[in-house]
Image: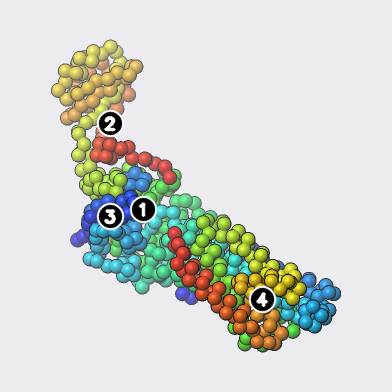
């Protein structure tokens, strides 16, 4: 198993485009947007916080995770299916499930690295506070990432071709990111939009990251929706995934 | 010893039996060909043998009844159209696949063996078609299998790469690995296989050696030539070996059996005619397939 993770990691690094995109784009946005004066001012609409305190870094964390989950992961898996990599593995004593596991591990590592850089450099450059509730933050990060990976696996299961998988991921990504508050903070959204968002995959993740970043406990509803997303997408992907 | 026993195998997709009552046995150490046109059910048959598909009915027994992972340890499979990640290097692929098996052969020696020693640091995507196929064979052999199933191995290869691949297969057999070779390429089956199962529309039409299959059809031969001077067809028609004489322009085609060539040349000599461009054509596996199924097999690189 370790060899498989290592080989998959090497392959990852040999195609640095998606990796750079997943790590550098959110980081660059955080550093650049964080310089805008409005982002650095205490805003009454945001409950007396600054946008760079937790809204912006949480959104950029989501951007990093969702890039891996919605485009890189399903794209790789669908390509492995389409080119027969999974089929070839199924002729050996080792199940192609292990390849899937190695992929999940590597995607998770990239998401963790991206998030660590966002926290560290955000603090250094803009004085963004560290997450105020570290254990809850870590738990929310893992649960939210797992739930988005679940959606990614479902995309891989349903995508008819390797090329269409990242495309489907991108189409899903933008409305979900909007609902999570990527462009307009959720505080400024109409109640109805915010309430719909509460029951979609991405907004609860963003909300729970912000809450734990601010040092609070995550809201139960957010945790439940994330867990349900993981359970439903994971079960569907397991049922629907074709190995060839 | 029988290493593979397939008995009345049937497999249905939707409402159509793509494998419809296939039976054959493969002896240890032989190269057994599964030959037939595209869509005949060859791949489905060997996928059932390899344990990758569950038959609807019938039985498959490999190496005395191994199943699951125990079977996959001892059975090397190279399936058509299964690639590797483009950026995976040759040695990495073999090293990784070697780790899948309890017992594996030394990847370095295997790389030498299949003639990829100077390509060991090359990425899969940069290999030629023939090199990719040789790597694919190496991956099927890295678990030190007793039986190797090789599906449409040389489809899409140029003639030189094809001959190199054939040589490699002969070497592997010399090492004692039993080989099941799936092909729709006649020349390949004729050159390599000890025995062939001819498959058409999911059924076995005949099982025999290539020579045996050819001898099943009428011993008809064809002699073609261009006579140097005027020639009366009656001279040839009078010969007991000759069954037919046809003219196409200045070319004469004589069909018949027995020692046709000798009879024709002797008759021409006594008539004072010299045959130019003399050719003898014997029945091929193609003709045997045509005679046994009423169909012409799609040859070459149809895919």
Q: Position of residue B113 (x, y in %)?
A: 39, 59
Q: Image point 33% across, 50% down: which residue?
A: B16
Tell me how far mark 3 sits from mark 2, CA to CA: 38 Å
Q: Are marks 4 and 3 on the same chain?
A: no
Q: Which mark is residue B14?
A: 1
Q: Which residue is mark 2?
A: B281
Can residue A107 be seen at all in this image of the molecule? Answer: no
Tell me how far mark 4 sits from mark 2, CA to CA: 78 Å
Callout 1: chain: B
Q: Secondary structure at mark 2?
A: strand
Callout 2: chain: B
Callout 3: chain: B
Q: Are marks 1 and 2 on the same chain?
A: yes
Tell me how far mark 1 sits from mark 2, CA to CA: 44 Å
Q: Position of residue A187 (x, y in %)?
A: 74, 76
Q: Which residue is mark 4?
A: A206
């Amino acid at each position: 198993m370790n060899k498989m993770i290592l080989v998959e990691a090497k392959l990852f690094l040999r195609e640095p485009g998606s990796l750079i995109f997943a790590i550098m784009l959110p980081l660059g946005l955080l550093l650049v947007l964080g310089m805008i004066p409005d982002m650095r001012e205490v805003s009454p609409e945001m409950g007396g916080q600054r946008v760079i305190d937790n809204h912006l870094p949480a959104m950029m964390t989501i951007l990093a995770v969702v890039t891996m989950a919605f485009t890189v992961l399903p794209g790789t898996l669908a390509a492995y299916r389409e080119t027969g990599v999974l089929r070839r593995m199924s002729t050996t004593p080792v199940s192609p499930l292990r390849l899937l596991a190695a992929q999940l591990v590597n995607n998770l590592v990239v998401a963790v690295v991206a998030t660590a850089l966002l926290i560290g450099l955000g603090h250094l450059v803009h004085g963004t506070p560290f997450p105020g509730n570290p254990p809850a933050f870590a738990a929310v990060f893992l649960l939210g990432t797992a739930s988005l990976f679940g959606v990614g696996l479902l995309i891989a299961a349903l995508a008819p071709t390797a090329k269409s998988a990242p495309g489907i991921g991108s189409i899903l990504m933008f409305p979900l990111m909007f609902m999570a508050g990527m462009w307009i903070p959720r505080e400024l959204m109409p109640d109805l939009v915010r309430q719909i968002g509460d029951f979609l995959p991405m907004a609860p993740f963003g909300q729970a990251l912000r809450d734990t970043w601010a040092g609070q406990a995550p809201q139960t509803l957010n945790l439940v929706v994330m867990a349900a997303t993981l359970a439903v997408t994971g079960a569907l992907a397991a049922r629907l995934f074709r190995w060839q | 010893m029988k290493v593979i026993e397939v008995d009345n195998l049937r497999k249905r997709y939707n409402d159509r039996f793509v494998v419809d009552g296939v039976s054959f046995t493969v002896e240890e150490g032989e190269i057994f060909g599964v030959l037939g046109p595209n869509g005949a059910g060859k791949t489905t048959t060997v996928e059932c043998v390899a344990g990758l598909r569950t038959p609807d009915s019938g039985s498959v027994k490999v190496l005395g009844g191994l199943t699951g992972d125990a079977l996959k340890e001892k059975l090397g499979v190279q399936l058509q159209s299964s690639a590797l990640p483009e950026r995976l290097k040759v040695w990495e692929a073999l090293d990784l696949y070697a780790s899948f098996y309890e017992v594996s052969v030394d990847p370095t020696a295997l790389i030498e063996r299949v003639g990829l020693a100077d390509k060991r640091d090359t990425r899969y995507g940069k290999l030629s078609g023939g090199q990719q196929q040789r790597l694919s064979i190496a991956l099927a052999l890295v678990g030190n299998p007793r039986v190797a199933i090789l599906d449409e191995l040389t489809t899409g290869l140029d003639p030189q790469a094809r001959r190199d691949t054939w040589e490699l297969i002969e070497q592997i057999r010399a090492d004692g690995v039993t080989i099941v070779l799936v092909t729709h390429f006649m020349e390949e089956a004729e050159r390599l296989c000890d025995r062939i199962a001819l498959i058409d529309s999911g059924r076995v039409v005949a099982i025999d050696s290539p020579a045996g299959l050819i001898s099943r059809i009428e011993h008809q031969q064809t002699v073609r030539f261009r006579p140097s001077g005027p020639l009366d067809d009656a001279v040839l028609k009078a010969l007991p070996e000759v069954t037919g004489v046809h003219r196409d322009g200045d070319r004469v085609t004589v069909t018949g059996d027995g020692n046709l060539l000798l009879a024709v040349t002797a008759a021409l000599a006594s008539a004072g005619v010299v045959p130019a461009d003399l050719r003898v054509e014997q029945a091929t596996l193609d003709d045997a397939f045509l005679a046994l199924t009423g169909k012409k097999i799609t040859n070459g690189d149809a895919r």
